[in-house]
Image: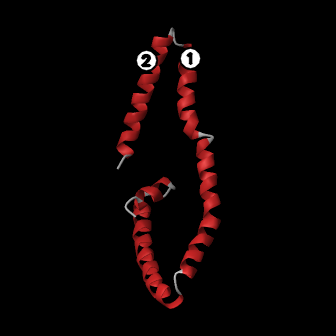
Amino acid sequence: MFYAPVLFQTLGFSNDTSLISAVITSPVNVAATGVAFVVVDRYGRRPLFFQMLLSQVIIGPLICVYVAGFAWSWGPLGWLLPSEIFLLARDQVDRARHQCHHQHVDDLCNWPSLP
């Protein structure tokens, strides 16, 4: 729940909208927990586990599609492209230095996004 605004912003929502979405998501979480308190005593644990299994069967493949899309695109290509760009360096030391600078710039650009 701590990263909900960041998640919504990554999905394309504006800053204000992502905060509002996080504010809406939190009461839904509290209400669903209240429903679980009532349902678990009245109907048992099995229906809750079955509902979770059902939602994992439905949402799980979507997450796998997302992971596969990242794995065949941005994941390896972020490492492959600099090695191809700096392929024309004068020698191996020069190429290694350029790739090292690329990695440092990449790390500096990603550092502000860390929590």
User: Tag 1, which secondary structure?
Assistant: helix
Judging by the rendered image, the residue that carries numbered circle 1 is: 87
Residue that appears at 41% across and 66% down: 22
Q: Which residue is mark 2?
A: 97
Residue at far top of view: 90
Q: Nearer the viewer, residue 108 or 72?
A: 72
Along the line of sight, which residue is nearer the eye, 45 or 84? 45
Between 3 and 59, the one lying in front of the other is 59
Number of numbered discs overlaid on the protein picture: 2
- Amino acid type at circle 1 is Leu
> How far is disc 1 from disc 2 in space, using C-alphas?
12 Å
Rendering coords of residue 40 (x, y %): 48, 84
Write the residue at 55% across / 75% down: 49
Residue lying at 56% horizontally and 80% vertically, measured from the top left: 46
Q: Is residue 36 above or below residue 25?
A: below
Q: Residue at x 57, y 39 (%)?
A: 74
Three-letter amino acid code at the position of disc 2: Arg
Left or right placement of residue 109 versus residue 40 in this view? left
- Position of the N terminus, as image quadrant, is bottom left
Label 1 Cα crowd, 10 Å radius (few <14 / some 14-19 / many 20+): some
**Sequence-earlier tag: 1 or 2:** 1
Q: Nearer the viewer, residue 112 or 38?
A: 38
Residue 7 x, y percent position in the rendering: 46, 57
Q: Residues within 10 Å of mark 2 (few under 14, many from 20)?
A: few
Question: In the drawing, what numbered circle is on residue 11?
Answer: none
**Colour pattern:** secondary structure
Among the 4 quarters of the image, the one containing residue 37: bottom left
- Percent x, y for residue 11? 51, 56
